[in-house]
Image: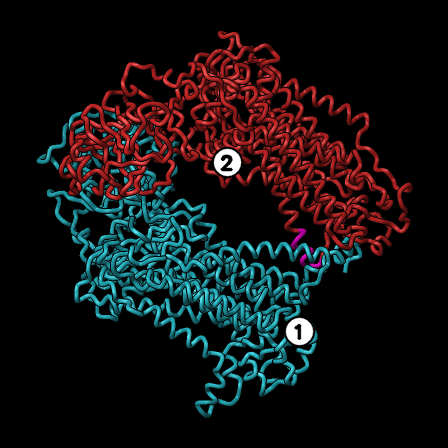
Chain colours: A cyan, B red
Amino acid sequence: MPSNPGEVALEIDSPTESPRASSEFEEVSYPTWSQPRAEEELPLHYMGEDKARRRVKGAQAAPESTVMFDADSPAEYDQGDDGGKDVYAKLRQHQTPVSRMRRTSAPPTSVSEFIQQNLEHLPPAIYTLLSCWTRFHDIGKSPYVVWDEAHFGKFGSHYLKREFYFDVHPPLGKMLVGLAGLLSGYNGNYEFKSGEQYPDDVPFVAMRVMLATFGVAMVPLGWYTAVELGMSRRACHLVALMVLCDVAWLAISRFILLDSMLLFFTFLTVYCLTKFNNQQHEPFSFDWWTWLSFTGLSIGMVCSVKWIGLFVTALVGVYTIEDLWEKFGDLKMPVRTYIRHWVARAGCLIGLPIIVYLISFKLHFLILNHSGPGDAQMSSLFQAHLVGNDFSRSPLEAAYGSRVTLKNMGWGGGLLHSHVQTYPVGSSQQQVTCYHYKDENNDWVFLPRWEEPEYNPNGELQFVKHGDVLRLSHFSTGRNMHSHAIPAPVTKTAYEVSGYGNQTIGDSHDYWMVEVVDDIRRGHRNNFETIHTLTTRLRFKHWKLGCYLRAANAVLPQWGFKQIEVSCEKEDNPRDEHTYWNIESHINDRLPPAEITHIRSPFFRDFWHLNVAMMTSNNALIPDPDKEDILASKPFDWPWLHLGLRMCGWGDNQTKYYLLGTPVIWWSGTASLGISLVVFVVYLLRMQRKYVDFAPGEWDHFLYVGKIALFGWCFHYLPFLIMGRVTYVHHYLPALYFSVLMVAHLIDHFFLSARSLSERTKWAVFAFCVISIVGTFWWFRGVAFGIDGPINDHKGLGWRKSWNIYSL
Amino acid sequence: MERPTGSRRRRGYGGIDAPSNVSTSARSSDSEDLPTEHSQRAGATIIPPSPWNLHNYAIVTVMTIIAFGLRFYKLNHPDQVAFDEVHFGKFASYYITGEYYFDVHPPFAKLLLGLAGWFVGYDGSFEFETIGDSYTAAHVPYVGLRALPAFLGSLTVPLVYMIMLESGYPTLVAAFSTVLILLDNGHIGQTRLILLDAQLIFFVTLSLYTYVKFRKVRYLEFTPVWWGWLCATGVALACSLGCKMVGLFTFFTIGTAVLVDLWEVLDVRKEGHTMDYFYKHFIARTVGLIILPAIVYLSFFWVHFALLPKSGTGDAFMSPAFQETLRNNELLMNSQEIRYYDTITIKHKETKVFLHSHPEQYPLRYDDGRVSSQGQQVTGYNHDDVNNHWIVVPTKALPETGRGRIVRHEDIIQLTHVATDTKLLTHDVASPLMPTNTEFTTVSHDEARGDRYNDTLFQVQIDDADPGQAWKSKSGHFKLIHMPTRVALWTHPKPLPEWAFKQQEINGNKKVHEKSNIWYVNEVVAVEGGGEDVRNRTGQVATKEPSKMNFFKKFAELQFLMLQHNAGLTAHHPYASSPLNWPFLLSGISFWTDNEKEEQVYLIGNIVGWWTCVMALSIYTGVIAADLLARRRGTYPIPYTVRNRLWNNAGFFFIAWAFHYFPFYLMNRQLFLHHYLPAHVASALAAGAVYDFIFSELNNFPISYPGPKTRARRPTRSDIFKVPAAITLTILTVLMFAMFLFIAPLTYGTPTLTGEAVNRRRLLSSWTLHFAAKKTTMD
């Protein structure tokens, strides 16, 4: 210890901040189950504390603890064990079933013994059955394409047809939809038009059931997570019941959507994390590795379903950083061990998820090997390899008079495009944009300068070369691509690019100089002269202004149909791929089609390209002030359940589904978050006044559960506040889970595990909670099970005026 | 940080030359007191020597004189309106003319400008219309107006010096921080014009100064001097907030420091810290730092309202009730009670169009295939014509004459279109543009009496009204709710196609509570029976006295509108920049240009100083992080007193910087470089602290005044390495001064620079200067 006086003072000053927290694990050689003797010695140290604070009236021994300990431990273990907040007791109690089964000797010899040994799994089993009933009950009631089934059903079909499509979400969830379709015998030929009735040959019920299975699994996951968080038995029941009884979770799980998978993997990640936390006393053991890598795998999967998964990743990240910070302060831990901790986490929590994410994209590319609606999002070389693509038959060398489409080679780049609409700002000339779908407006023709003789379709064929100055004429409108010293609409520092003039009108601002960068096949530009389709990388330099044609994923406002802005960049940056273009399709009757095999674009290139394109489209999903989106809602509306969402048409004859949470669950969840902060501050203040409310270790555990819930909620909610994109109420569903955990945690802390309350009071509180949860669920079950007949006949559902559940 | 060790270097364990037995009685890390064995009660305490001595006075005087010189130099140039003088000059004039205006900033800074204007005899007649308007031509005493910001801007310089000196830093360090502000082109440029920032920066700096002073007398709790500095802090805070809402960040800064302070007071281990003692402290802070500032802040508004009794440009922002408190307000003059059978025109509050109808009908089928009722079109039209006239028809029996004929809140009425003699109605047919909303049309009287009767019924819901309140023209903002379908009369700026002459669509909005449903009666065109003068119907005289309104209501309304409009300032501005650019000076603001003389004022900081500050902040973060990591590993590399100063004092400056900087990232409004200036002052203070950390091993310690209970301690003196520190300071000053001179033509707008000279001054490619020499044309 240092001799510096000030430091000593500090040590005394902060006893609450316990640097011993993590080192305890190190100091104590923890018992293994094969060595009951060692175990008997160890807990005594802790039991003193345990007994001190576990003055529970009418101790109820948790059934499984009896089972667990009757073989190898003295009676004092289950004495007054309320399943409370002691980490160490929990660690023992909730040793993974795997390890316990592996290490306890006797396999069950009779059914009753089997039941005895697995009694703790009885409640979750019952909940799972109940969950099956709620999720599957009448699941095919509405034989129509409900809500976003129109999207995700269609995406699933694309996998069955193996056609390349584009969407803003990563592929895993949609591949599972496709898998569900495959397993249920769907042939992939249905369009999934919104609101349409399913034809007989689409096994939509089977598909819904398969996807609802993910929703079923949420309930047992909720239960086991609560168990791992060390909640009392009754609090576990509350968590399971709330997960079971929330009608929003229920409704969203019953259709062909990605949300049930997203929720499932989110729950799974939290479960794995808590499970891993409980292995912390035995670092680098088999179970420790198992749960660490499971956490990583489920992170990978949740992120491969929707990018929202990054939020739960952030929770795991913060947990890990705190954990490593704790270990950093453990002076007894050898540096090598500490480094091993880092490496293990980097490998399992960063490496594994990335591998899972990559694999999902690899599968995506492998399955979708046919040309489809999403082609234009990808690079030209990628498209050339899709079955049904005709690039390889276009002429090889570009000449004057060639009709071409030009593809931007930057990440996420699109096709150079123009349409008759004009810029509402700047020059008011015709818009030139970058567009991700193929149509005739993407076609441009290479034409000579005004001073030169007009292009003669019958004259000598003249190839375009490096350094040529030419005009780019838009095929369908005849305008010439033009630039002038007017700032571009979004990137103000660059010049605007527009369509100007026609076949006869124009000026020298229409001239562009072709600069060849290189050719992917032929190498440096000195090696060749003519420009090849697909492989030659070009830049277009404005002859007059010296700027470069560029498209860099800046999205135009609604007047530009959210297409990508094309501008002329003043600064010459020869490495900027957003100024690189290649010829994608090429039509010239005077040239023979080239039968060539193309170079395959590498996987990582395609992967990154697709991800940037997804990011760009995601950012383009901003709320449109001109268009009222009745479905969208603001994040502030969610915690208090301000709005619901009609998932389908609201006619009297339709089965109506309304996406609305169970009010008690949502409201109590939100309230509990606020209360938790108050409670935290009050406890801190009391500590500063030296009130002892917690036994050692108890405060840490109280904080641990609270942090999981609070940080989890914040990470899943707050980002939406600053996100520019349009948000819907179902974006709150992952966050809701953490508020549910917080409710259970606080009720557990103040009532169910409270020392001062009698067993009767606890039962009363518990019963009250159960009745209100189940009662409201039953009251609102219709919104998820489907409401038939005129909605206004169903009284009592409009608890808030802002809900548009009733038609006017 | 490792430097050659000299004999005076004493870093590391036991580094300070305190007696070794200190540790035995050390009690607390957060207190500065290091009690010694010779602890004695008051009387034996050693009073910390005052930081002020003759050469300090000399330095601060010289610096202040230089500051005044630099800020007042050529204050008359440019003699034209520059940048936001357009706004703030105008607002200052309004205080002199007494015309009500609206601005997003609180009034205090503008009140000061108005005061300066009044003082120099300005009559408030100049319009400040556009940037570049000449002052001299209009004989505006603009130099007097500019003198106030320049004066406060100059005074900020000695304040910075005093903050550093009072914080216990040696003269060299105080000079270091001061030079960073003294020679900064950004501060000079911003504080020479009629703007609010000079006032804001001065009061923000003053708040930091008063809080440092307060902190130093904390052992003399509840004495007059203690109360004095506490209240001074509160007043300075209120003044900062009164200048701009940015002052809120200063509140957060001081608030954080106060919370840390109170946390220590709460500590049960300290002698005599009972809960009563804590409550006393808590209440004192509440009074001094919340209640007092609130009173001061409100008083600014009181003065604001008192000085602006007349109708002016700001009327239209305010509610009708507010407007009626202004003399000669249009509402006040023209507001009339509406009676049944009066002919009126109705205007939409947001888009200012009249409710209009004409004989043309809706086309049977729209482009998207939906069908209409083919009824007469009802549209929104922004010109006054007879097709905008509507008669209010009662649905109940009326008395022959008198006040019974007045239309009241929640009355159910019909509206007759005068020109076509038809009745307004809406029904369950989708509107032309929005399938979700209902179509408005008119029907003949026969139909309106027949089975369409119910569809012609509308309820007048006057906004914020009491039951039975009369419906008034101009002031009576109302919603017109359709009785059977409960939709509200609504319009939106999207025009209808050619068949409706591109007029605005009118439709029924199901979201009844939206603000955009509000309309008002623009005019009572003719009254029932005709002939009678509308004005005199009620027998009132034409000139009305302004009505009274509760001050707090007025304040609440204005404050809310300020915040709302502030958040709404999202329009693009060519010189707006994102906060990330600011500390590195990536872009400036063009304040003013003169195309004839090719002169320009370009707001940009002194790049030497700003980058020094950025470096200092990163060093600080690095040191703190290294300290945390080292302590986590059980090593304690920084001596106690140094660490105490580094965490508490430099930390205070650092959070001041952070609080005045990072919240801008969360703002969506347009942001400018000058928003960083308060944070820049804080970063200059932090830079001084870092400079001290680098060059000295020990601090002046203690610096707080001992109280009756504090124990005696042996003071330490700063052992700053004078020579290297002085050399560094000299180099910095010379560089700063050179850079200042170099950029000065952009700051002062004179002398004229050649194109090449402008190019040379474009130190970063992102600076957008005018009159740059063109590059030779390409190709």
The nearer-to-camera label among 2 and 1 is: 1
Mark 2 and mark 1: Cα distance apart in space = 60 Å
On the same chain: label 2 and label 1? Answer: no
Q: For residue B643, say whether it is visible.
A: no
- State the residue at coordinates (23%, 39%): B455
Q: Where does residue A545 sit, x and y in percent of width and height? A: 33, 28
- Location of the C terminus of chain B by quadrant is top left
- Quarter assignment of residue B159: top right
Nearest to the observer: residue B709 or residue A569: B709
Farthest residue to the bottom: give it.
Answer: A109
What secondary structure is the magenta-colored segment mainly?
Answer: helix
A174 vs B230: above or below: below
* Chain under numbered label 2: B
A678 vs B600: above or below: below
Secondary structure, mark 2, is helix
Q: Residues within 10 Å of mark 2 (few under 14, many from 20)?
A: some
Secondary structure, mark 1, is loop
The residue beneath circle 1 is A55
* Chain under numbered label 1: A
The disc at residue B617 is none
Magenta stretch: give its range. B627-634
- Quarter assignment of residue A174: bottom left
Q: Which amino acid, by three-letter code, is at mark 1? A: Arg
The residue beneath circle 2 is B581
Q: For residue B53, say whether it is visible.
A: yes
